[in-house]
Image (cartoon, coloured by chain):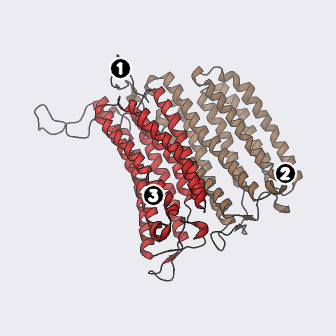
Chain colours: A red, B brown
Amino acid sequence: MGTDSGIAVPELSSVQFSTVYNLFSLVIASMLFTALYLLFSRGRVAPRYRNALVVSAIVCGIAAYHYFRIFDNFQESYPPEESIASSHLLSNVAFNEGYRYVDWLLTVPLLLIETVAVMALAKSDARRLLWKLVPASALMIALGYPGEITSELGPRLLWGTLSTIPFIYLLWVLFVELTRSIDRQPPEVQHTIKMLRLALVGLWGVYPIAYLFPVLGGDFFGGADGFVLRQAGYSIADILAKAAYGLAIYKIARVKSGLEDPAYDDDHAVPGPDDGSPARPTPGRDTVAV
Amino acid sequence: MGTDSGIAVPELSSVQFSTVYNLFSLVIASMLFTALYLLFSRGRVAPRYRNALVVSAIVCGIAAYHYFRIFDNFQESYPPEESIASSHLLSNVAFNEGYRYVDWLLTVPLLLIETVAVMALAKSDARRLLWKLVPASALMIALGYPGEITSELGPRLLWGTLSTIPFIYLLWVLFVELTRSIDRQPPEVQHTIKMLRLALVGLWGVYPIAYLFPVLGGDFFGGADGFVLRQAGYSIADILAKAAYGLAIYKIARVKSGLEDPAYDDDHAVPGPDDGSPARPTPGRDTVAV
């Protein structure tokens, strides 16, 4: 190890290799098809919420692109050896964690944008929040990158600490400033928005823990098991923080659309004049473009 | 060096290689998903501004295509060596800067077209401006190309100077002729359009500076660090001049659409008769196709 601490391990067993391989493929499928689902569903929410859906789809699309790259890179870094049962040895191609930072640099600010978009705040409130959230989140990711690519523990801790400063600022904006705006949301979605905010911050906690694996060191964290756990942590956190998060945004947009315009409250059977009759078409819905 | 001054360096360290590699991937993701975002958002602006959005998306798409090529070319030019920590040596495949000129030859005139399109000028004014801007910008790029691929400094300076002539003409058209048209734009977008014009010209300044690196010479500008800085300059300037520029065009189109037809001013909660009441649907929006 030494010069590449924690970023690449010299050997993965065939089981470890398959686990990471299948996880990466799971992420690609989740991201790509969540993106398509959100795009094809945007006609089912009121126009003012469509941007939130398109941005959520873009986030999943960007993640899918990066996982295609990560997947190919992983295969090149750990090529097949003599037999199926052989361990995969690290080749002369580095396993490039830098992709993840490029991904987060684009997707983390967009996740905050989709969250503010689905709240449909007054224009000045939305602008004020975004001017705080977007630069702080980009700074948080950018400051983590030099620490991730370094081979030494000192700079890793230094950059990690610097990156924590905008993170704490984000927490303050999300949990103090945003709370006032959440209180003005319809009661039906207030709880969901609060859970989303908690999920976002909770999932962000996965990334610094994985970042600290090389600092923790030891046989486990610095070795092949630590590598697999780290990739699994990133992959599952990415699915939850982007795909599942995007679907929750869609759900909020659907509920708010239905509250504001009955034309969008069309998912379920509509009881007739005497209850229990079969569903009838909702009037006016066919005027809504897709 | 000698015969390939500044266009290709014989050796990149693994950190230099990763930096350029991750930057190229960042450009691909930025361009590709800005293009998709603009395409899926075109229903959110009035019909007369949709062409500006589609052209902006096409510009980003063309750039994404070229960066896929540049990315693959870069990997072939600097293949992995013995170990992950080894420097990447220039292979028998040239790193082809010519791609960039093909890209600019298509995208720079289109950037001017999208700018004129979003202003929605009178037909004769638009035609007159485009007949000046488009040929001049194509000529500016075409005259730079022979200077870029030459190995000698004399022709590089000669073609660079020739290319500056249409550039100065463009400045004159943008800052003298276009100003009359900007003054007739709604006050809400005049400032943004002026900033865009400044950004366009400011970012174009990056390209001649990078072009002059080989002329500047020296260990830095002619060496690996100069190569990385040059690629970083091109990449960041391309993201700003195409993706960020396209998003600014979208923003102008949204503002103008909202001013001309309240159906498009729908992003935010609409306060009821007494403030603080829940949002109500915006009438008339259902006539807008997506």
The residue singled out by tag 3 in the image is: A234
Q: Confirm whether circles 1 and 2 share one chain.
A: yes
Numbered badge on residue B272: 1
Secondary element at image label 3: helix
Using residue A35 as the reference point, say whether residue A155 is left or right of it.
right
Q: Is residue B32 visible?
A: no
Who's the residue at 37% across and 44% down the image?
A: A198
Measure how far apart labels 1 and 3 are at the Cα level.
44 Å
- The quarter of the picture where residue B185 lies is top right
Measure how far apart labels 2 and 3 are at the Cα level.
45 Å
- Residue B31 coordinates in the image, percent (x, y): 58, 47
Badge 1 crowding class, 10 Å Cα cut-off, few under 14, some 14 to 19, many 20 or more, is few
Badge 2 crowding class, 10 Å Cα cut-off, few under 14, some 14 to 19, many 20 or more, is some
- Residue B239 coordinates in the image, percent (x, y): 62, 45
Secondary element at image label 1: loop
Q: Circle 3 marks a residue in which chain?
A: A
Using residue A151 as the reference point, say whether residue A167 is left or right of it.
left
Measure how far apart labels 1 and 2 are at the Cα level.
64 Å
> What's the amino acid at mark 1?
Gly
